[in-house]
Image (cartoon, rainbow, N blue to C red):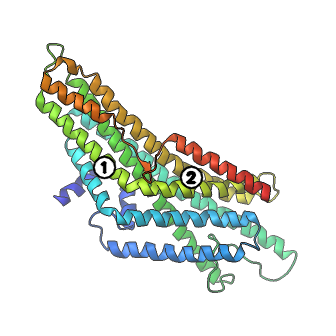
Amino acid sequence: MKSKIDSSILDGTVSRSIEIGLRVIGVWPDSSYAFLRRAFWMITLTMAQTFQYRYFVIHIRTDDLSHLMDGLSTTMSYSLLLLKLTIFWINRRIFHDILAMMARDRSDCATDWAVCSMSRTTYVSHRSSNLIIGLYSMSVFLYGTGVLVAHGDGVDDEADVQPAVPERELFLKMELPFESNVSPVYEVVMVTQFFHQLAAATIVGVLNALIVSLILHVGGQIDIMCRGLVEISSDDDGFDLRTTTIKALIRRHQRIIALSADIETLFSYIALMQFLWNTLVICCLGFLIVTSIGDTQGSTMLIKSLFFYVVITLEAFIFCYAGEYLSAKSRMIGDAAYEAKWYNSSPTQSRTLLLLILRSQRKLTITIGKFMDLSLERFTTIIKASASYVSVLHAMS
């Protein structure tokens, strides 16, 4: 049975790029060496965080504020990734159940319209996933380009002043336990940091693309159910609501509720970390962008920070929009059931539809740590809070 579910997944429930990314972090069902993959990410991210926070503690009194904000933004992004992966590893059984339900939903598409609707949803999901992952990978290349440009400018400026070897900037600001400023150690550290940062950014894109795919799948199932509610009342010769059809719709509604509950369990505390960390990261990057504008040497900082700011803001928007989209879609079920002319059916059938209407009044959503719902209003809260912090930092600089 498990191989059948996996085969359905490979046929297009989630994109191939998401599947590969989830295999890399060891959460895809039946992944080989899953424990070693999880151990690799845990060890490397923990080591990177140790050296990054060590740099911040040592240089907090000596570096200027822009350098600290630059290092802190990437440091907190790594911290957020580590927390996300930990939550995902703990709840991987729930994720496997989600994949099983998605595979069952695909196999239960009995009508041509349902098949067409799922195909359209899958197409949009795959395109969105590849775009999101590509944007995160591109941000690393542009950030690295900014570091290299800044390094080249720094070398030229130092060459006019003193012949000594200048302090060379790393991709990720770290206080390493060995001398990393001399060749070939510097080049080895730079290459290692670049590829690890590229892999980490890609995994962040995979996790964000995953929630988009899951929410789009739920939305597709809701569309199919709404279409079914319309069709059972389309017969004008007495509105013969077939009991078997209503039961099938009830079962589909129950699966939608169960799937949404599992998605909420999987992403609720990830959304909480996202809400807290993204506010600070957007604040740091916004400060770098504001201070770079008008500075004669701020072009390199803009190259590093601007696209990074875009993808971090996009990350917050994706989670907030996913919650808003799910809530809006869930309200469509009650509207479609109310318009199904239940009052012309038999008492038993009408009571069943009335219970469905009543159950659909409880909207589906994704919460921020079980405290509040994710919505576009929360996204505006993140942006406004970040802008307030930026103004305070700018006044202090």
Task: Kindly report which numbered mark, 2 or 1, lies closer to the viewer in this rendering.
Answer: 2
Q: Position of residue 267 (x, y in %)?
A: 41, 54
- Image quarter of the C terminus: bottom right
Q: Nearer the viewer, residue 264 or 126?
A: 264
The reply, left or right, for residue 113 in relation to residue 44 is left
In the rendered image, which quarter is residue 96 located in? bottom left
Q: Nearer the viewer, residue 381 or 104?
A: 381
Q: Nearer the viewer, residue 65 or 371?
A: 371
Mark 2–mark 1 CB contact (< 8 Å)? no
- Identity of the residue furthest to the top in this view: 237
* Residue 144 visible here: no
Label 1 residue SS: helix
User: Looking at the image, which residue is at 61% across and 47% down?
Assistant: 383
Amino acid type of the residue that numbered disc 2 sits on in the rendered structure: Val
* Vertical side of 137 occupied by 12: above or below: above
In the rendered image, which quarter is residue 48 located in? bottom right
Residue under label 2, please give it.
311
* Residue 263 visible here: yes
Q: Which mark is residue 98?
A: none
* Vertical side of 315 occupied by 22: above or below: below
- Cα separation, mark 2 vs mark 1, equals 26 Å
Residue under label 1, please give it.
12
- Identity of the residue furthest to the bottom in this view: 178
Q: Position of residue 228 (x, y in %)?
A: 23, 29
- Identity of the residue furthest to the right in this view: 161
Q: Position of residue 263 (x, y in %)?
A: 35, 51
Q: How many marks?
A: 2
* Vertical side of 370 occupied by 257: above or below: above
The reply, left or right, for residue 122 in relation to residue 197 is left
Amino acid type of the residue that numbered disc 1 sits on in the rendered structure: Gly
Of callouts 2 and 1, which one flags the residue occurring earlier in the amino acid sequence? 1
